[in-house]
Amino acid sequence: MEKNWSELTREQKREIRMKDWLAGTGINFRDAHAEKMYKERVNRQKKVMMCEIPDRVPVQIPSANFPAYYSGYDLKRVMNDYEALEKSWIRFMNDFYDDMDNFMGPGFVHSAPAMEIIDYRSYKWPGHGLGDNVNAYQFVEEPIMEADEYDALLRDPSDFSFRVLLPRTVGTLKPLANFPALPTLLFLSLMVAYPFADPNMRAAFQSLIKAGEELEKWQKHVGCSQPGGSGSGISSDDGCTSHRPFRCDCRFPQGDQGGHPRHVPLPGKTLGSRRPDHGTYHHTDPVNGQCHRRLHRELSAAQGG
């Protein structure tokens, strides 16, 4: 009889999580050689993760947006031309096939048309606030919320994000500021339809649908140019993303201004947001975890605790 998940040791849980990754489950390898190379590469990476000695050091080329330029394009072109995006990343992956063990696909090369459709305001990008030849994004460093709004954020982060932060950072979603408070939907479910009597609210959600249709096209090309999607035998470096506590609670709402723990307004409130159920404080990454614990100690000291 199999043990319940809660009865497994952390080592057993880790082995279960790694099983599909090591086997290449779900990857349609283009040939037997690609499958063989994949398994060599992921087992090499696993040994490093487990502080064991691999046959050699795994190699990851920090390519960022370079594949676009390697194929004669630029960032603006591949943000708007998904076929050029796919072609660039596949060419780079094939040309440097023997030089790297894992590779990040173009998932962070965002769709410019999708961001334009919703009037996304937290970024500037080539051709949209930046020159056509700029090779990166620019985060717009403007405060999104005021210090006296922390109580509302901590009371209900989901409602505050939906009805306050989104209308301030996405131009087409300004009408969400007039949406009923999300907790009211718990006992007045018909309320969910009432806001759509307003044509502005309908237009806001239609902009999301239109952006979603654009992203569907983008995702097909991104998927084909990922290591897994192409069946190349190179391990994908996409992994998962976690957010630092101050990115969520302080730096992002303040537009990356005044985000150092010694400059946090109302430190007691930001520290109070680090409840166990808030997920952002608990990280599997040991390096980030150490940083977060240090920040937590600094906040405690600032609070006199």
Image: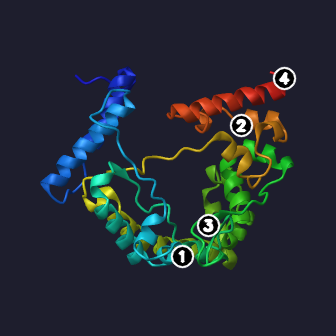
Q: CA distance from mark 3 to mark 2?
A: 32 Å
Q: Residue at x 40, y 59 (%)?
A: 105
The three-letter amino acid code for the residue at tag 1 is Lys
Q: CA distance from mark 4 to mark 1?
A: 49 Å
Answer with mark 3 or mark 1, whichever residue precedes in sequence.
1
> Do the residues under discs 4 and 1 have CB atoms within 8 angstroms?
no
Q: Could you classify mark 4 by the number of other residues whose Cα lies within 10 Å: few (under 14), some (14-19), or many (20 or more)?
A: few
> Do the residues under discs 2 and 4 have CB atoms within 8 angstroms?
no
- The numbered mark at residue 193 is 3
The residue beneath circle 1 is 76
The three-letter amino acid code for the residue at tag 2 is Ser
Q: Residue at x 84, y 39 (%)?
A: 266
How far across and how far down the image is residue 48, in percent? 36, 33
Which of labels 3 and 2 is toward the front? 2
How far across and how far down the image is residue 287, in percent? 55, 33
The three-letter amino acid code for the residue at tag 4 is Gly
The residue beneath circle 4 is 304
The residue beneath circle 2 is 273
Q: Residue at x 41, y 72 (%)?
A: 85
Asked whether the viewer can see residue 184, the reply is no
> Do the residues under discs 1 and 2 have CB atoms within 8 angstroms?
no
Answer with mark 1 or mark 2, whichever residue precedes in sequence.
1
Q: CA distance from mark 3 to mark 4?
A: 48 Å
Q: Residue at x 78, y 47 (%)?
A: 152
